[in-house]
Amino acid sequence: MDAMGLCAAVGGLFSMLFWVFVIGIVVLFVL
């Protein structure tokens, strides 16, 4: 695995976790 692939994989993972966190916070505030 090259550096670009690794960066893309890590970036995608953090992006997904970030959006899950944001949506969770919004849901908590709305409810």
Image (cartoon, grey):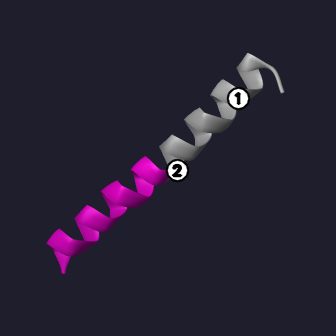
In the image, is 22 to the left or to the right of 17? left
Is 27 positioned to the left or the right of 30 in the image? right
Question: Where is 4 relative to 10, above or below?
Answer: above
Position of residue 22 measured from the top left corner of the image (x, y, whole percent) = 32, 55
Instruction: Residue at the far top: name it.
Output: 3
Q: Which mark is residue 6?
A: 1
- Residue in the image at 76% along x and 26% along y: 5
Q: Main secondary structure of the magenta part?
A: helix
Residue 23 numbered mark, or none: none
Q: Residue 26 appears in which quarter of the rendering?
A: bottom left
**Residue nearest the observer in this picture, 11 or 30:** 11
Q: Nearer the viewer, mark 2 or mark 1?
A: 1
Vertical placement of residue 6 versus 25, above or below: above
When the figure is inspected, residue 16 is found, relative to residue 27, above or below; the finding is above
| Mark 2, residue position | 16
Q: Position of residue 29 (x, y in %)?
A: 15, 70
Query: Who is closer to the viewer here, 3 or 30?
Result: 3
Tag 1: amino acid = Leu
Q: How many marks?
A: 2
Quarter of the picture containing the C terminus is bottom left
Q: On the image, which quarter does residue 20 sit in?
A: bottom left
Q: Residues within 10 Å of mark 1 (few under 14, many from 20)?
A: few
Magenta-highlighted residues? 17-31
The answer to whether 7 is drawn above or below residue 10 in the figure is above
In the rendering, at what x and y percent does residue 23 appear? 35, 62
SS state under label 1: helix
Residue 14: image location, x then y, percent: 50, 42
